Image: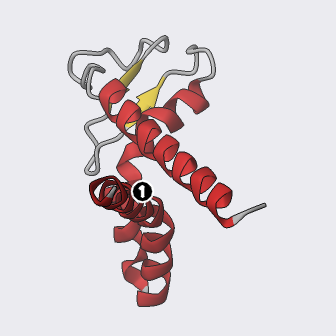
Amino acid sequence: MSKELAYKIATYACAAYVAIILFSFLASIQLPNFHDFSPQQRSGCYWTNAMVGYVECGSDVLFHKWRRLFFNFWMMFVYFPLLGLTGWLEGFAIALAIYAPVVFLVYSLFRRANRIRNN
């Protein structure tokens, strides 16, 4: 596999990663909050009123664990690096794993824009 093909595959994978995060954010902000949704109702997803907010789905929701993972996916940008505060090495590794695809995508977009401008 050539370097250029590997670079394109990595760019598309990073773009898909960012698109999933954005779509997760847009989908989760449209859910009702805890007060608008009765927790006894187990047939929907809602925002919790916990100290750290997140989306919870009732057990009657089809694929409730997968939906909860999808709706909370975008929050890993905020919460996961904070979880690494117990040690600098763990925090750095978590932040690198989360933010590296975004940084690579921004780099590749600047590289493409520079290539277009020079041609």
The part of the image, by quadrant, that contains residue 102 is: bottom left
Return the x and y of residue 64 as percentages of the image width and height. Answer: 57, 24
Q: Mark 1: which amino acid?
A: Leu
Instruction: Please report the residue visible at 25 percent of the width from the left and 37 percent of the height from the top.
Output: 49
Assign a secondary structure to mark 1.
Answer: helix
Instruction: Please report the residue visible at 66 percent of the width from the left and 55 percent of the height from the top.
Output: 5
Return the x and y of residue 89 as percentages of the image width and height. Answer: 48, 88
96 or 87, which lies in front? Answer: 96
Instruction: Please report the residue visible at 50 percent of the width from the left and 46 percent of the height from the top.
Output: 17
Pointer 1: what residue? Answer: 105
7 or 16, which lies in front? Answer: 7
Return the x and y of residue 23 as percentages of the image width and height. Answer: 39, 31
Is residue 82 shown left or right of residue 65?
left
Is residue 62 shown left or right of residue 51?
right
Reply above or below: 26 against 43: below
Please rate how many residues cluster around mark 1, counting C-alpha atoms within 10 Å: few if below 14, some from 14 to 19, many from 20.
some
Reply above or below: 67 against 53: above
Is residue 17 shown left or right of residue 117?
right
Is residue 65 shown left or right of residue 42?
right
Say which quadrant the C terminus sits in.
Answer: bottom left
Reply above or below: 28 against 8: above
The part of the image, by quadrant, that contains residue 77 is: bottom left
